[in-house]
Image (spheres, coloured by chain):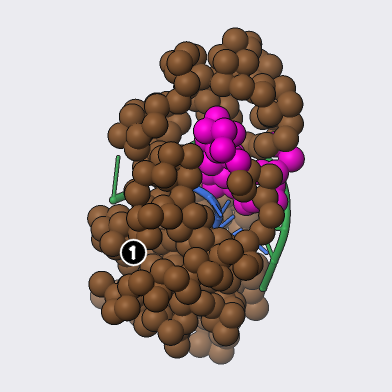
Chain colours: A brown, B green, C blue
DNA sequence: AAGCCGGGGCC
DNA sequence: GGCCCAGGCTT
């Protein structure tokens, strides 16, 4: 995996001991409090979680107190923290563990609201079990360390487990996460201050690891209206951030797109002349292209800056067997 | 595997 | 206005 695994571990642990942030749950030994901190930290930044950690413990100082509390009071203490299923699950968990938390990864994993990450974090931090916790920070650190653009879950599990300092599992897990949160950050990582830089294969281009998620593109129906006048076509000036300043055929999105376009331009009969597909970063447009004549003069589209989408529409028009007369 | 859940900070 | 966050559950 890594040459010199032990020096790598020592370097990261030494860095952690010198630079770790003082957090309310650091040094805590009560498994309940460790669990609470981990649940609060799910998809939540440390700074945001801290006030809720104190507020929640004041209201429910023990697992038993939580088990006996009304759900509404639990949600009240969680109010503002978001992801309220976490609070409901935590209460269910308390009710399901009258004799205290189980002490192994396997058993913790079976509890409501406890997934692979939280089970590993609690098992290692509270009970010293040598199991690697993989969160978003660790994912990023490992992706960069080994220059893997799209780390798969199985690879992450195996790699994290192979790197784990088993005799100090809880500290190790926190060290790797702390490194990701404060040094190996998503943007502008501070590689010069990183204890693992010597071993890092992604150091030259950290922004490539992990590759940004391919944003899921929604399919959106749309309509374009080609209005032909004596001097050319009616064009709209686009606004908006990405296409702002470009020109294009009147375009509307959604199911009633054509009706809205016809209303906007006072057009009745339009003839469908084809379909154009175009993918943006965040959505896939399927554009029905409609044609009609107009009394407006129109203009030459080649004289305007057009987006790729509008060039496709123009190409469609010029490809028609019987091009609509201008 | 994808969608959903929330609020906040940062660019 | 998008991205990301000490993820987990449901479909």
Q: Position of residue A10 (x, y in %)?
A: 45, 71
Question: Compared to A210, does A259 lie above or below?
Answer: above
Badge 1 marks a residue whose secondary structure is helix
- What range is drawn magenta here? A28-52
User: Is residue A107 inside the magenta stretch?
Assistant: no
Q: How many numbered circles does the render carry?
A: 1
Quarter of the figure with residue C9: top left
Q: Quadrant of residue A165?
A: bottom left
The residue under the point 45% across, 88% down is A204
Residue drawn at x 48%, y 70% as measured from the top left = A12
How dense is the environment of label 1, judged by Cα within 10 Å: few (below 14), some, or many (20 and up)? some
User: In the depicted view, which residue is nearer to us: A325 or A313?
Assistant: A313
Which residue is nearer to you in this view: A259 or A287?
A287
Q: How far across and down, in percent of the image, does residue A200 sit?
A: 40, 80
Residue A130 showing in the rendered view: yes
Residue A296, percent across and down? Answer: 62, 71
Whether residue A236 can be seen here: no
The residue to which callout 1 is attached is: A163
Q: Looking at the image, which is closer to me, A278 or A74?
A: A74
């Amino acid at each position: 995996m890594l040459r010199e695994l032990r020096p790598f571990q020592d370097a990261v642990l030494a860095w952690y001991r010198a630079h770790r942030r003082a957090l309310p749950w650091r040094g805590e030994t009560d498994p309940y409090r460790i669990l609470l901190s981990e649940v609060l930290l799910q998809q939540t930044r440390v700074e945001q979680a801290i006030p809720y950690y104190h507020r929640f413990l004041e209201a429910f100082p023990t697992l038993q107190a939580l088990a006996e509390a009304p759900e509404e009071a639990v949600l009240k203490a969680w109010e503002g923290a978001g992801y309220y299923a976490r609070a409901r699950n935590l209460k269910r968990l308390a009710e399901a563990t009258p004799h205290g938390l189980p002490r192994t990864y396997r058993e913790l994993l079976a509890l409501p609201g406890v997934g692979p990450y939280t089970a590993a974090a609690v098992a290692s931090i509270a009970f010293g079990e040598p199991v690697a916790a993989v969160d978003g920070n660790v994912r990023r650190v490992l992706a960069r360390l080994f220059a893997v653009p799209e780390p798969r879950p199985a690879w992450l599990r195996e790699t994290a487990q192979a790197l784990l300092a088993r005799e100090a599992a809880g500290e190790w897990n926190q060290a790797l996460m702390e490194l990701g949160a404060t040094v190996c950050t998503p943007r502008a990582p501070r590689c010069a201050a990183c204890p693992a830089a010597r071993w890092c294969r992604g150091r030259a281009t950290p922004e490539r690891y992990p590759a940004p998620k391919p944003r899921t593109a929604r399919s959106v129906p749309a309509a374009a209206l080609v209005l032909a006048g004596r001097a050319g076509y009616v064009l709209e000036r686009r606004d908006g951030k990405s296409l702002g300043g470009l020109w294009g055929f009147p375009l509307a999105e959604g199911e009633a797109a054509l009706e809205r376009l016809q209303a906007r331009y006072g057009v009745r009969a339009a003839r469908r002349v084809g379909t154009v597909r175009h993918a943006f970063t965040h959505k896939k447009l399927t554009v029905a292209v409609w044609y009609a004549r107009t009394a407006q003069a129109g203009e030459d589209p080649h004289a305007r800056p057009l987006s790729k989408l509008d060039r496709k529409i123009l190409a469609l028009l010029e490809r028609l067997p019987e091009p609509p007369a201008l």
